[in-house]
Amino acid sequence: MSAGDYAYINAKIGALRSRMLTQGEFRSLIEVPTVEDVISLLKGTFVGKEISKLQDVNVLNIEGMLYSSLAQEYERIVHGLRREPKVAMDRLYKKFAAEVVKAILRLKHAGVPPEVIRSSYPIFTTRDLTEDRIQKMIEAQDVRELVETLKGTDYYKPLSKALPSYTEDGSPAVLTSALDSFLYQNLWGAVSALSTRDRAVARELIGMEIDLRNVLAAFRLRGIDVSTAEAYFIPVRYRVRREVLTAILGLRHLGQITTELPHFGYTSLIASLLKDYDSLSRELPFGMRYAPASAEAAREYEGIASVLPLEIALRRHMIKLYQRAFRGDRFHIGVPMGHLFLRENEIRNIITTLKLKEAGVEAEKIERMMVF
């Protein structure tokens, strides 16, 4: 697309960005005493127009409303693009929508009844996931039947192919990882087809996202056999080589990253983040525990510290990367990609505030969970 083509979508994104909450507004949300007060303040922002449409105003319904709003923004942005950028953004949209599929898969695997899923998960629809299809997913008797309800979508093939492994392993992570791998490979293929400038920008944004997801997965999977862990990695290598992921799997503790790993593109970043790991871990509002991907890892690493502090720190780094897309020349695909990433982060911050405030967590601890 030419600069002239991007002028239209940039104007649309500019209007959307003007509605986003400022850090000052977030701090006001955090400082009020109750979740009811948070909702009251939200009603005074652009989000308030959507809240006013809810028949029952509660945290779950607000969460569903916010993600529905984001899905509509994806639709509008995809519609405003042409040719290769349109394809790339459409595949990014499918990755976003897949979060609904993965969430319901996990709940169905856990045996959660349909009525509980409806009352506990913020359902939102997308182009592929209509209300009727989502209801069929929720009503499915088991995971295999749920996968069958996805025939005709991009999610069906990778999930149906992974079903035998799921049956053997018994972990929903086998399915969700297979879906992530498929969607990220499709997205990476679309990024590779972009013109020179768009391709350079998108490769940095999406490539780093893939790299850091794989690094975090390796930290979570420490103690797992390398051949087993491979299924949980996105099979795209940008700056993180396979031997780096293998080395992370063998770490006994996070502090070994500076002495036991081969140097790679994010060594300095990870090492600097780990300096603050212990203090951030102590400041989190809950006693987060490590959630291993298998019983083998659980036995070997029972009680190991969560990688959540590292995940928060890496997401803050990604925020800075996406914010850079709005500086200088803005006639490239990084602008719509950056806007949607930042909007999703804004929603996460809102929902985190609402849920922690509802749980009675004090303001200063909530603020440490925010990603700006």
Image (tube, rainbow, N blue to C red):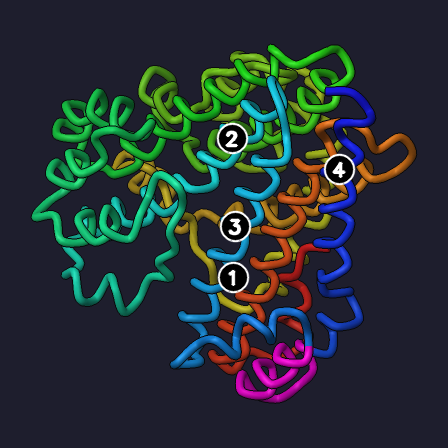
Left or right: 277 as drawn, with respect to 180: right
CA gap between label 3 and label 2 equals 12 Å
Quadrant housing the N terminus: top right
CB-based contact (under 8 Å), mark 1 and mark 4: no
Q: Which of the two discs, 4 and 2, labels the residue nearer the N terminus?
A: 4
Q: Which of the two discs, 1 and 3, labels the residue nearer the N terminus?
A: 1
Task: Name the residue beneath numbered marker 1.
Answer: 66
> What amino acid type is highlighted by mark number 3?
Gln
CB-based contact (under 8 Å), mark 1 and mark 3: no
Region rendered in magenta = 29-44
CA gap between label 4 and label 2 equals 18 Å
Q: Secondary structure at mark 3?
A: helix
Of the pair 110 and 284, the residue shown nearer to us: 110
Name the residue: 19% across, 50% down. Answer: 108
CA gap between label 1 and label 4 equals 24 Å
Q: Which of the two discs, 3 and 4, labels the residue nearer the N terminus?
A: 4
Q: Which of the two discs, 2 and 1, labels the residue nearer the N terminus?
A: 1
Of the pair 360 and 59, the residue shown nearer to us: 59
Task: Name the residue beneath numbered marker 2.
Answer: 90
Of the pair 198 and 81, the residue shown nearer to us: 81
Of the pair 144 and 314, the residue shown nearer to us: 144
Task: Name the residue beneath numbered marker 4.
Answer: 8
> What amino acid type is highlighted by mark number 4?
Tyr
Quadrant housing the C terminus: bottom right
Q: Secondary structure at mark 4?
A: helix
Res. 72 mark: 3
User: Is residue 30 in the magenta section?
Assistant: yes
- Vertical placement of residue 279 versus 245, above or below: below
For label 1, count other residues whose C-alpha is less than 10 Å away and answer few (under 14), some (14-19) or many (20+).
many
